[in-house]
Image: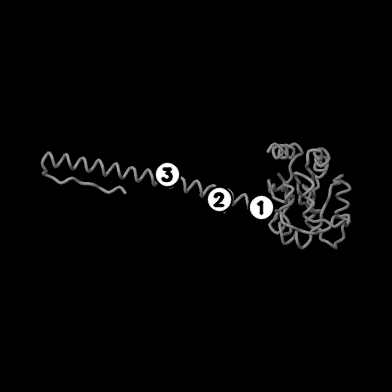
Amino acid sequence: MTGCESDNNAVTDITAEKNVTSQETTAAEENITEEVTTVKEAQSAAEQTSDGTENEAATAAAGEEDSKLKKFGSFKSVTVDGKTVDDSIFADSDITMLNIWATYCGPCIDEMPDLAEINKEYSDKGVKVVGIVSDVYEGDDVKGAQDVISSTGADYTHILVSDDLYNGYLSDVEYVPTTVFVDKDGNIIDGPYVGSMSKEDWETTINNLLDK
């Protein structure tokens, strides 16, 4: 992958008494056996309880992790064409490939023709590509971004940075391109992938997600 830096880890010891009669010795041995058996049973019960508790805890942790399934976050912004857009853009596709790029980033621009092809070829499989232009804000001159989009044939939706995006997911993005895959509810289901990839690698990634 290649990319550009963005502007923005009880068992109790038991001892038999010495010098006892054979009867006392036998009795002591029986007592020891009973006590050891009791201890083993107690240990076994404790281990079972512990395992059950650990399993419950692991299940709860997994459920909690799923419940946090990293939402991309709600936002409102505009596209490079001036159309109003928000996070409901995810709802009409099973998977949205969100590609965060910049107009100064060579690797970003180099992979955009491939992303345009992916957007077309996978549209009937419930997959779409959406770009976020990380260095162009609402109200900025969008000509530079439009020129890149036109020259690469990347005719999918491209969103400008708004306060919502800047203070949300983009605040953690250090390099471009960065790509994440989002489901129709806005949950991040894969990524982030930092750096550009070949069309074949992206297709493998997408096909794996579709198989799931």
Which numbered disc, 1 or 3, marks the residue that appears first in the sequence? 3
Q: Are marks 2 and 1 in contact (CB under 8 Å)?
A: no
Q: Is residue 105 left or right of residue 24?
A: right
Query: Please, is residue 208 above or below residue 17 in the view?
Result: above
User: What's the amino acid at mark 3?
Assistant: Gln
Residue 184 at x, y percent in the picture: 74, 48
Which numbered disc, 2 or 3, marks the residue that appears first in the sequence? 3
Q: Which quadrant, please, contains the C terminus? A: top right
User: What's the amino acid at mark 2?
Assistant: Ala
User: What's the amino acid at mark 1?
Assistant: Lys
Q: Which mark is residue 61?
A: 2
Residue at the image position 45 percent from the left and 45 percent from the top: 51
Residue beneath label 3, please?
A: 48
Crowding at mark 2 (Cα within 10 Å: few <14, some 14-19, many 20+): few
Task: From the image, state whether disc 2 or disc 3 is nearer to you.
Answer: 3
Residue at the image position 31 percent from the left and 45 percent from the top: 39
Residue at the image position 13 percent from the left and 45 percent from the top: 18
Q: Which mark is residue 116?
A: none
Instruction: From the viewer's side, name the closer residue of 197 and 46.
Output: 46
Q: Which quadrant, please, contains the N terminus? A: top right
Q: Is residue 24 left or right of residue 190?
A: left
Query: Please, is residue 158 above or below residue 28 in the view?
Result: below
Q: Is residue 16 left or right of residue 202?
A: left
Label 3 SS: helix
Q: Are marks 1 and 3 in contact (CB under 8 Å)?
A: no
Query: Please, is residue 142 above or below residue 197 in the view?
Result: below
Residue beneath label 1, please?
A: 70
Label 2 SS: helix
